[in-house]
Every structure is written in structure tokens, then in C-alpha cells.
Image (spheres, grey):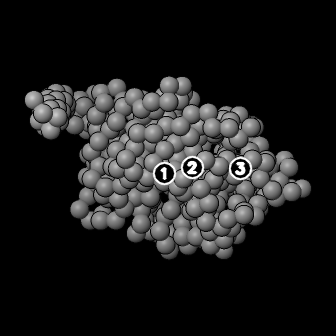
Amino acid sequence: MSVAQRIEAAKAEVEKLKDEIDKVRAEKADKTIDQVSASKGPLKEIRKPPSTKLRRTLKGHFGKVYAMHWANNSHDLVSASQDGKLIVWNAYSTNKVQAIPLRSSWVMSCAFEQTKGNLVACGGLDNMCSIYNLQQAQQQSRAQQELVSHDGYLSCCRFIDETRILTASGDSTCILWDVSTGEVLTTYSGHKGDVMSLSLNPNDKNVFVTGSVDTTAKIWDVRTGKSVQTHVGHESDINSVAFFPDGKAFGTGSDDSTCRLFDMRCYAEVNKFGHDKILCGITSVDFSRSGRLLFAGYDDFNCYAWDTLGNGGVHAFQLPQPHDNRVSCLGVAPNGTAMCTGSWDTLLKIWA
């Protein structure tokens, strides 16, 4: 048997195994999530019209806002804009706590450290992650640490704790760094396209999920450096991923105009959110504190809330005229009381 024949035989075997896996998955997917939730008795209706209203508008950026992230106190947040500024805001008073000038204005991501709240990080087309200490940043605007190793733009960064940070990049890898030394601890490679987003498991910091341009979402174990699950289903780039509050499922937003809910326990997609009228891509997703609502920001300036237990073809509600340009980022505060949306119209808005 020649090498070419062996390769063809192996390919045929792989296809056969894939078909078998699909068959087993199809057998398990015997009910939709709204049928299952209805069988447990009537669900509490989501209030119509919703009480969610615009409460604050944060004005101060002069360029498109690309990213935002809440501090653990649900009081402060950091935003990154292509005006070359990283601004830390007090979301209650709308005051700017700090403005940090960046070396590169092409910033695409920012993150607030969640345990003590002293560190913020950002990165973008400069291919590196810059970390600023808010206690020192008032005296000097230089970065405390610059993490350089990625061969592509930095699309997302998230602190695990004060000593470690995860970054996702357009070079199709993620890297775990030591914040104090700037060393690369682990490189996670497995995606076949740019990694656009990552989200840490809220209940187990050793697990994170990534979404990629290769249309897959992967679950990773921080300790082993390997992907433990690969979830397929989207038909275009995944731009955003967010863990469900219980850490057992996650949501995704994609350029195929749908959001999806994947459950790690059954290794499958359990709900799909979208309808024929929505044709544009999704830039960002996040869950309400209970997980009942999945919020999604869209390229057509809208922001929809979807009922995770309902029929994915009908949205629960829509934010009233959120922005005058693309909604580039959104995040629900850790205590669940408010949500912030950021947009290319240079504004950030707080909804509650």
C-alpha cells in the first residue's frame, strides 16, 4: 500500500468517525431548550417593556471606543479608544479617575485586574500587552510591564490574578504570562485562525474559552496548555465569547449574525439566537448575573437581549437607541446591577 493510498484511507476513516460523532450528537439533541424549560412549569416572564434604561453617559474619548472592562467593585471601569487613551471611569459619578496616554493608539483590548484592582492592561496592533499600575500611573505614564512575544495583533487580554495574565492574538495563539517578570509561561496553540476573544471560567480560573476566525470555540486547561473541547456550529468568525455565570456553559457572538449557547457537559450547542431581520455581525456578548439574559452588541448600532431559556428566534428586548455607530464592546458589572456599552460613536453608556 503506497503512502498516498494510506493517506486516502486515513482521510476516509476520519470522515467516517466524524459522521459517527454527528450521529450520536443528533440522537442526544432530542429536545430544544425552551421545550425542556417549559416542562419544568411556566417560566417567569421577562418584564415588558423592560425596566432597563440609560442611566449614565461617559463622555471623554475623542476616538472610537474599542474595548471596556469592569473592575471587580462594579463601580469603576476601564475603556480603550483609538484616541490613544486608556481611561479609568467612576461609573456612578461619570468622573474620570485616570487617563493613561498609550504609546500606540491602535488599541483593541483592555482589562481590569479583578482581585485588588490596581492593574490595567491593554494591547492591539502593536502586538504587545502593556500593563499599567494605577497606583504609580499618576506619577508616570510609562507601562509597568510590556509583554512581547505575539507575532500578530493582540485581540483580547484578561488577568487570572495579580501575577498572571492571558492574551489572545491574531497569530492564532494565546499566551499565559508572568506579570512581574514578563516571561511567557505557556503558549496555547490549536486554532487555525486569529483568536478574537477569550473568557475565564468564573468558578475555575484554570479553564478558559476562546473564539476564533476559524469559526470554532475551544475550551483550554491553563495547567496542561492543551485544548480539551472544540465546539463547532458557527458559519463565520466568532468575535466574542463569554462564560455562563455557573461556568458550565458559554455564549458566543459571530459574524454569521447569530449568538449561540454551548454547554460543556453535553459538548453541544443548546440554543441559537438570531432571526432573519438581523443580518449584521455581533461584536460582543455577555450574560446577566443570573444567566437568564444574553446581551449582544451588533454592527448595526443595536444591542439586543436574548432569553437563554426561550426560543432563540425572538429577542427578549432591545436597548432603546443605544448608539449612533457600531457597538464595539459591552460588559455586565460583576454584581449584575448595570451594563456598559461602548461604541465607535466615542461614547460609553451605562444601562440599568
Name the spot of residue 198 as percent of width and height, x first: 50, 44
Badge 2 is on which residue? 150
The residue at the point 32 percent across, 58 percent down is 257
Residue type at mark 1? Asp
Element under label 2?
loop
Instruction: Tell me: residue 105, above or below residue 307.
Output: below
Q: Which residue is mark 1?
A: 171
Write the residue at 57% across / 33% down. Answer: 186
Residue 323: percent from the left, percent from the top?
51, 69
* Amino acid on which the number 3 mark rests in the picture: Glu
Is residue 293 visible in this depiction of the protein?
no
Quick one: 116 or 151, which is closer to the camera? 151
Which is nearer the N-term, disc 1 or disc 2? 2
Q: CA distance from mark 1 to mark 3?
A: 18 Å
Quarter of the rendering containing residue 279: bottom left
The image position of residue 56, as x and y in percent, is 64, 62
User: Does residue 184 appear in the picture of this structure?
Assistant: yes
Residue 164 figure quarter = top right
Circles 1, 2 touching at the beta carbon (< 8 Å): yes
